[in-house]
Amino acid sequence: MKRNEFLKLCGLLGISFPLQSVISSCSSSNTNSNNNPPESVIIIGAGPAGMAAGYLLAQQGINFQIIEANSSYGGRIKHNTAFSNFPISMGGEWIHVASSILPEIVNDASVTITTETQGYNNSDLVQEWDGNTITETTLGNIGGSQDLKFVGSSWLGFFETYVLPSIQNNIIYNTPITGIDYSSNDVIVTSSNGQTFTAEKVIVAVPVKILQNAVINFTPELPNNKQQAINNVEVWGGFKAFFKFTSKFYGAYLGLPDSETDQGQRIYYDAAYAQNTSDNILGLFSVGQQAEQYQNLSGNAQRDYILNELDTIFGNNIASNGYLDHIVQNWNAEPYAQAAYIRDQENWQLLRTLGQSVNNKLYFAGDAYTNGEDWSSVHTAVRSAKRAVEEMVS
């Protein structure tokens, strides 16, 4: 699971966590306070930030288009609805803040939100594997967890219910963007097949790895500090797997010796926690260096590697003998993501620079483009979208 709040449970391993800098919110150096709201906006990317931005623009009656490279919306919050009788989140899965984030996203007090969430219990079983033996304790003994699980839903399911209906007719799919020209009064956006789109302002809501790999060319080039921030942030790769078993032999979480390091994170967890299901599904979350051991394999070799790891930890070939099925998600292999998210220990000043707008024309929204106070989660992505929209319409 993402971010240090979730990995509090790795206190089992005696590992300390990097401290998040406490800073005040910083507004962009390119404010729009003297301009009128734009008549047209192009949003590049239909992930949570892009959808949230479009939704807020729709609420204000501003004309917009969302241009998405993939054949569907969702980005890194996509889910699988075929593996079990509840959605399996292949990317962003947990709510890392209070459930009040849901009405905050909807931004309409007249809407009743029926999406259910559930927190973890202090009595939940937590296990630790130190490389030789496995020990057990409870979540309460290691400080608990404030994270929430969706019940019978997911981040994508929430967006489909409350955000998508008002923006779905404004999304253009299968249109990768390769160029943004903001040298004139209007911004011209060019796709990989030469199609062009024009608007007064553009919100760039693509994963930062796409900008690192220069998939999109900017005319003129982005300011030096912006480009340096893009180049210098470390973006972790990401891999998730979900294994279905005949019985449940694991607790809510299983910590490993390398669950939390400066190079990455990984952990096993009960993916069916809080769900109304008889399925026993163990999830594997890994990012950074810890994901590479899984990403370097595929097919049966990848499956057997994970089963062998679990057999070693729990003994008696319990995982191999109880195995039923599995699915995996390698985010490095996704052409329009190419990675997971920025490492937890990154310099907050780089993140703040990533989030700043350029020339009152280009705005940036997503889990990486924040004010530097927090990053790499769904709630930071939607809040960055809100900030971008507020700046351009102020």
Image (spheres, helix red, strand yellow):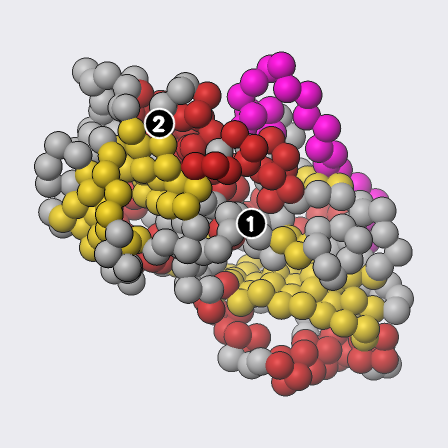
The image shows residue 170 at horizontal and vertical percentages of 43, 37
Q: Name the residue under label 1.
A: 77
Q: Quadrant of residue 94?
A: top right
Q: What is the crowding at mark 1: few (fewer than 14 residues within 10 Å), some, or many (at least 20)? A: some
User: Magenta stretch containing residue 119, yes or no?
Assistant: yes
Q: Residue under label 2, please give it.
A: 63
Amino acid marked by disc 1: Ile
Q: Is residue 376 magenta?
A: no
Q: Front-most of 92 and 128?
A: 92
The answer to which of 64 and 110 lies nearer the viewer is 64
In the image, what residue occupies the spot 37% across and 49% down?
Answer: 206
Q: Pointers 1 and 2 in contact (CB under 8 A)?
A: no
User: For this view, does 113 lie left or right of residue 294?
Assistant: right
Q: What stretch is highlighted in magenta?
A: 101-127
- The crowd level at tag 2 (other Cα within 10 Å; few <14, some 14-19, many 20+) is some
Element at label 1: helix
C-alpha span from label 1 to label 2 = 25 Å
Image point (20%, 18%), residue name: 35
The answer, for residue 224, to whether it is visible in the render is no
- The residue located at (85%, 75%) in the rendering is 322
Q: In this view, does 174 lie above or below 59?
A: below
Residue under the point 81% across and 73% down: 324
Residue type at tag 2: Asn
